[in-house]
Amino acid sequence: MLIWRRAWSTEAETKLDIDEPGFLYGGVAYETLRTYDMRLFAPKYHYERLLNTLSHMGLDLSLNYPTFKRILEEGVQRLGKEASIRVVAVPRGRFSAFEYAPSHSELIVYVRELKLEPLGYVKVKVSNVRKIDPLSTPADLKVAGRTDILLAKRFKGDAYDVIMIGSRGQVCEGTFTNVFLVKEGKVITPSIDSGILPGITRLNTLRLCRTLGITVEERWVELSELYGADELFLTHTSRGIVPVNEIDGWRRYETELGRFLSSRFEEFIKSVGENWE
């Protein structure tokens, strides 16, 4: 692993201070990226989403987009392999038990080899832990240690992911995935106002479906619709599109359309110029 913190170092050379504010008091924003053919996938989207998370906490990033992208590209070149990249923005300012006054954030970049094992039979579960209502915590606040996600993951077991339901019973998303279902040839996914993170792979999947002439609905989705769907698939950065075989240990799905979209995903995203800006 390579780590950038104003300079590149290895994992063994990197130290975490015991009084690190992000460790003691939280507020660490993050994004996860990957490469295709050693090119950064959608770096500008990730940069803008990171800035959005920081804005919720009254913070900014001292790096402009060209500098941000250059650092990540340098890490990929140093690694020399397809990469999984974790970007975190650590708050800096005045912190104590009585004061949380962040002034700016420091960027730390982790670059490691992207290793994807064969998927096999994909199972998911519906979580008993509800997604935090956006009135309490914005759905697009992407910070390490969100309690709803941590508690939901506790019961994941051998499932690929767990799907979280919102405070009004609507289907939201997985702990690291967006959710799509297929019913009578239509692709349906929870809308942004359902209380979900606007996933970058989700966006590209919607564009792919529309390019192929597949009807897409972005709307509130009831839990019963998951069990009544013909197919179910997930999307996330590392894998793209992941067809689901089973939910909650009893409901099994067809995977024809999900597998077809997955097979077309990489070719499609490479043809969209703004993914590589």
Image (tube, helix red, strand yellow):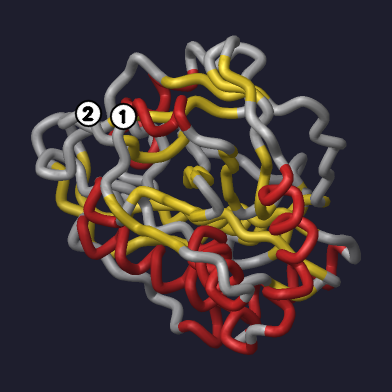
Q: Residues within 10 Å of mark 2 (few under 14, many from 20)?
A: some
Label 1: which secondary element:
strand
Residue at image position (57%, 54%) is: 32
Specify whether 12 is left or right of 179.
Answer: right
Residue at image position (67%, 48%) is: 258
Of 214 and 178, the residue lying toward us: 214
Q: Position of residue 37 (x, y in %)?
A: 85, 71
Q: Position of residue 148 (x, y in %)?
A: 32, 27
Residue where numbered disc 1 is placed:
165
Residue where numbered disc 2 is placed:
169
Q: Is residue 73 above or below residue 185?
A: below
Q: Is residue 254 above or below residue 257?
A: above
Q: Amino acid at mark 2?
A: Gly
Q: Do the numbered discs 1 and 2 sit on residues whose CB atoms are within 8 Å?
A: yes
Residue at image position (48%, 65%) is: 215
Cα gap from disc 1 to disc 2, whole angstroms: 6 Å
